[in-house]
Image (spheres, rainbow, N blue to C red):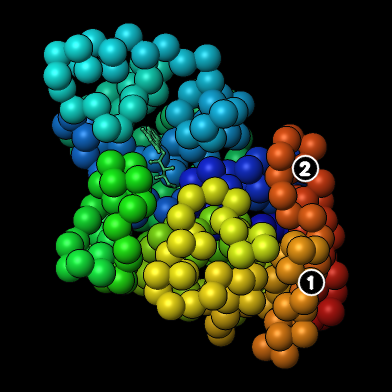
Amino acid sequence: MKVVALAGGVGGAKLVDGLAALLNPDELSVIVNTGDDFEYLSLAISPDLDTVCYTLADLANPNTGWGRKEETWHVFDAIQSLGGLDWFRLGDNDLATHLLRTNWLQQGVPLSVITERLCSLWGIEHRVYPMSDDPVRTIVHTASGEALGFQEYFVHQACQPEVAYFEFEGAENARALPQAMETLNACDLVILAPSNPWVSIDPILEVQGYRSVMREKPVMAVSPLIGGKALKGPAAKMYQELGIRPTAFAVAEHYEGLLTAFVFDHVDRGELEKIEACRIIPLVTDILMKDEQDRIRLAEEVLLFGERILNRSH
Ligand code: FO1
């Protein structure tokens, strides 16, 4: 079965890691959100790409989910002692990635080629694609009328401002990555990883081309919410501020018109009928991924469920 997963940062990377343990490199490709990308200390940072790659390469920090494991912080400490910008923490090994990426981008190397190079250096065999080589920037518009860059909102202001709506600057002119489109066209199943629907998956769907190919494919989403709470990050808070109850059903509804199937937690079993009423095929299971075993178990269930769906539609 050929699978394409769409993913943002930490939550999505965990499921992708589980899928990668079960599928061969020619059976799994990942399209990653780059709406979170930004420039910091003149460096080009691609947090979600790095989170997915570090996780697949077993280089990720197990405590934060982002950044590198066994990291040192000499440069960060030195910058701090000089009174420099310190709201976004870059470890020494992680810095090497940003320095190289920035250098290559300045030489005119596309982000997709840089990602391919890094994957090969880190021994990642599955394909990891940025959603586009063109810049797309997620802007968080707040209830008080501010327009904040995503990392300014997420890290610097710790998701405190009340959100009003999101803008994906550059998305309308960004070109979907041709290799990603090709892989998507040829795949049997699309999986929307348990990433934030508003700011991790939507930016990918806003890039022209992806959504229309996906309408022709079986699409399965895995809920990023359990019992009204996000596994990580501000998804539940965002739903609330946007006037929507943060439920598994709300996630399914978010992807209206796209979803064939939806995987959500036992805790949210009460929403089963509402989800089925939307003609979405449900799988109720334990979606919390605490460790490597959970990632593989959930990935296995998701793939078996995917096979059942494919057999149904044939
Ligand atoms: N998230 C934080 O909450 N604080 C940080 O200082 C931080 C640094 C950081 C450095 C590199 C990187 O790749 C990711 C980093 N993140 C940090 C995580 C990241 O900004 C968010 O998790 C994603 O953008 C949301 O998916």
Q: Quadrant of the N terminus?
A: bottom right
- Assess disc 2: are there few (<14), some (14-19) or many (≥20) residues with their C-alpha within 10 Å of its C-alpha: some
Residue found farthest to the bottom: 277
**Mark sitting on residue 294:** 2
* Residue located 28% across and 41% down the image: 156
Residue 191 visible somewhere in the drawing: no
Nearer to the camera, 200 or 152: 152
Residue type at mark 1: give it: Arg
Q: Residue 45 location, x and y as percent?
A: 31, 37
Q: Are marks 1 and 2 in contact (CB under 8 Å)?
A: no
Q: From this viewpoint, is residue 164 visible?
A: yes
Residue bearing the label numbered 1? 269
Is 114 drawn above or below residue 150 in the view shown? above
* Residue 71 placement (x, y as % from top left): 46, 16
Q: What residue do we see at 70% from left, 82% from top?
A: 275
Q: Quadrant of residue 314?
A: bottom right
Measure how far apart labels 1 and 2 are at the Cα level. 20 Å
Mark 1: few, some, or many residues within 10 Å (few <14, many ≥20)?
Answer: some
Residue type of the residue flagged with mark 2:
Asp
Q: Earlier in the sequence, mark 1 or mark 2?
A: 1
Q: Is the CB of mark 1 within 8 Å of ligand 1? A: no
Q: Position of residue 107 (x, y in %)?
A: 19, 32
**In the image, the residue with mark 2 has its CB under 8 Å from the nearest atom of ligand 1:** no
In the displayed structure, 49 sits above or below 3; it is: above
**Could you say which is closer to the camera, residue 54 or residue 292?**
292
Q: Which residue sits at x=56%, y=84%?
A: 257
Q: Residue at x 40, y 17 (%)?
A: 93
Secondary structure under tag 2 reads helix
Q: Is residue 39 left or right of residue 191?
A: left
- Circle 1 or circle 2, nearest the eye: 1
**Vertical placement of residue 127 versus 2, above or below:** above
- In the rendering, at what x and y percent does residue 161 appear? 29, 57
